[in-house]
Amino acid sequence: MQIRGLPSTLGLLDQNLAAEPRNIHFQQESQLPKEETKMNTEPERKFGVVVVGVGRAGSVRMRDLRNPHPSSAFLNLIGFVSRRELGSIDGVQQISLEDALSSQEVEVAYICSESSSHEDYIRQFLNAGKHVLVEYPMTLSLVAAQALWELAAQKGKVLHEEHVELLMEEFAFLKKEVVGKDLLKGSLLFTAGPLEEERFGFPAFSGISRLTWLVSLFGELSLVSATLEERKEDQYMKMTVCLETEKKSPLTWIEEKGPGLKRNRYLSFHFKSGSLENVPNVGINKNIFLKDQNIFVQKLLGQFSEKELAAEKKRILHCLGLAEEIQKYCCSGK
């Protein structure tokens, strides 16, 4: 099967929705920003925000919080938390984690640290009565994610997992091409440089954006098999995952990482009505983190229905569950 490339424009970020997924269980979920006219009036109040972690994602979040954007008008950047002693960044003051947790001025935490620390930070800020936006994946285990959703519900706080790859132009194009078509078989290959396993966790989690693409395009999936080939001395890893849709159509997902491999996607979807083996240049992905922030603010303002929130939660937990199954298969084969 010939597979042509789909270039990625997110650089080093492995980051998630679009309308009307084919599976009815996901039909109510929408991660596309709703009409921003709802935000075009002067807000009655602003939510104080602290950014935890000021690497690439955190720096973008701090920039966007000061962007003249309708969603940013509802937010007030109080400061940032970092394990490094930085003092200030562009006039924004560093504050301690303890002060961020105890401050009544801080109502929202943006968690932009490494994936392995997400669970602990989320729990601390929810327990302190703060709303949380967290970069994906929210946790590295399904049980932990379920517990954090329950904690957020108990505290009456918004827990939002970002996934900007579902806000990309390429994904919007794919949704339009896939909706209403009967899949016969498909494949998705992602290539990139070596994976820092200690920093990003098991490969299934670092690549969960691709898994989320497939679930959002084709509905709930079942795992058939998964294998992992590793040559640590060469910094090479190849994970091959075989999945099935609810209609038993096969989907193959491959993650291949190693020196000299460029960051790229290759896809091939075959439908009863034809095939999709290439995605044209659909434009630059502009302001995708701002789009995600817009979704988060709409949740803070109560503009998402319970059905939409439940569908999003269902999708996130389904993908984490699949990732854990994949991990077990791959580890058992070592």
Image (cartoon, grey):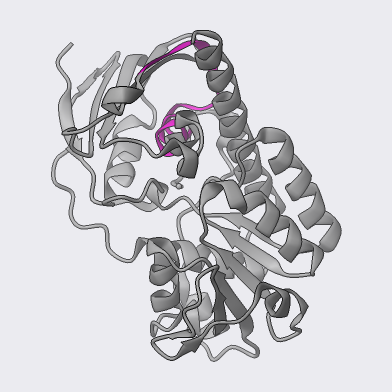
Between 132 and 206, which is closer to the camera in this rendering?
A: 206
Q: Is residue 256 magenta?
A: no
- Judged left or right of residue 255, residue 106 is right
Q: Is residue 223 magenta?
A: yes
| Residue 271 location (% of width, % of height) | 30, 17
Q: Quadrant of residue 171?
A: top left
Point out the stretch of residues depicted in magenta.
Answer: 209-230
Examine the rendered structure and indicate whether residue 216 appears above or below residue 149: above
Q: Quadrant of residue 26?
A: top right
Between 317 and 12, which is closer to the camera in this rendering?
A: 12
- Judged left or right of residue 211, residue 147 is right
In the orientation shown, which residue stands out farthest toward the front? 233
Query: Which residue is located at x 38 percent, y 87 percent?
Result: 90
Examine the rendered structure and indicate whether residue 218 appears above or below residue 39: above
Residue 98 makes an appearance in the image: yes
Between 33 and 13, which is closer to the camera in this rendering?
A: 13
| Residue 131 location (% of width, % of height) | 69, 67
Q: Quadrant of residue 121?
A: bottom right
Could you tell me which quadrant the N terminus lies in?
top left
| Residue 31 location (% of width, % of height) | 50, 52
